[in-house]
Amino acid sequence: MKHIKRLWLPFILLFICGVLQGAKPVKMWGKLQVKGNQLCSEAGEPITLRGVSYGWHNLWPRFYNKHTVKWLKNDWHCTVLRAAMGTVIEDNYIENPEFALECMNKVIKAAIKNNLYVIIDWHTYYPQKEEAKAFFGMMAQKYGKYPNIIYEIYNEPMEDTWDSVKEYAREVISEIRKYDPDNIVLVGSPHWDQDLHLVAESPLEGFDNIMYTLHFYAATHSQELRDRAQAAWEKGIPIFVSECAGMEASGDGPLNMEEWQRWIDWMEQHKMSWVKWSLSDKNETCSMLIPRAHKNGGWTDDVIKIYGRHVRRFVRQYNQDIFDKK
Ligand code: MG
């Protein structure tokens, strides 16, 4: 009898470890697809991804590691993370590609290992088309076979026209599709991803699994932007909120909790995925952590700023079903 018990012990331990590892979003939903204006699982069910964005890799590289990925899944209950590779500001990808790729690869590989979706974000506000084509071609070759990957090809066009963003998108997406026929690609629009009315008038044609990003900062943007996005959505435009937050568009100033909640209610009502900005430790409202926060996670409330605590609460609340199922 004793021997039998001993034989079972390793299996019991393995089972307990499996349970403790928690939810497996990518195992659950598989290869994502866009149907009409909705993000869907491989089985065709509408799904909503919710999570956080790392800050610029060149400003806050210390958080780009496998430990934070694991922590953001197991403690914050994220189903998606966004790795924001800076291609402007000092020490960016164009200037120092080795370091940028080291940061990105750590987060992407850990996301794959932890069964999370991960957005590879080209974080910039002006076009760098040739560099972007080469980068995304490389990423698609390396990671295109993994269902975890989402490409965000141009964070926030600032001065471009929709025609020029469209041309940029056509070229970059064509490069991705040479190696990866199916993973989701997120496309920006003029004025920091707010001109969805222009997208609705003339969306990209000839590509599958494309979504358009909407970014908002709740103390600056309100009903007017929601109305505009809603009209685009009603015309069939798939929207992914790859960056948003509760304060002013500068990333600083007071939170507007009422407006922020209105945005969240609106996104939830439309089953739109959302990602909060950002995992960083600057003295500004939108930095979720204080400088004393450890680079590897394990964050208690005393090192998470008020905004970050709200983000963690929201993500946990709205992803609760997914993490209860595990
Ligand atoms: Mg693929």
Image (cartoon, helix red, strand yellow):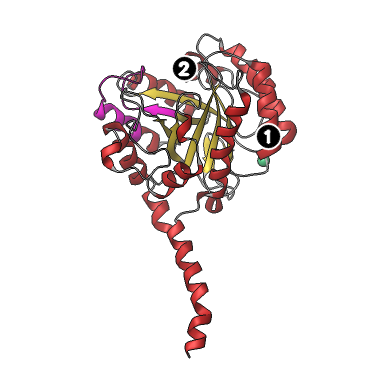
Residue 308: percent from left, percent from top: 32, 34
Q: Which mark is residue 226?
A: none
Q: Is mark 1 within 8 Å of ligand 1?
A: yes
Residue 86: percent from left, percent from top: 53, 22
Q: Quadrant of ligand 1?
A: top right
What amino acid is labelled 1 in the image? Ala
**Spatial distance from mark 1 to mark 2, Cα to Cα?**
25 Å
Tag 2's secondary structure? Answer: helix
Judging depth in this view, the residue of 188 and 124 nearest the camera is 124
Q: Is residue 244 magenta?
A: yes
Residue 207: percent from left, percent from top: 67, 29
Picture quarter with the C terminus: bottom left
Q: Is residue 292 above or below residue 30?
A: above
Dots 1, 2 in contact, CB < 8 A = no
Disc 1 designates what residue?
140
How crowded pointer 1 is (Cα within 10 Å; few <14, some 14-19, many 20+) is rated as many
Q: Which residues make up the magenta segment?
A: 243-265
Tell me the residue at 45%/35% (across/down): 63
Judging depth in this view, the residue of 49 and 236 nearest the camera is 49
Residue with the most extreme right position: 178
Residue 183 picture quarter: top right
Q: Is residue 41 above or below residue 274?
A: below
What amino acid is labelled 2 in the image? Trp
Q: Is residue 219 magenta?
A: no
Can the viewer see residue 79? no
Disc 2 designates what residue?
192
Q: Is residue 4 left or right of residue 52?
A: right
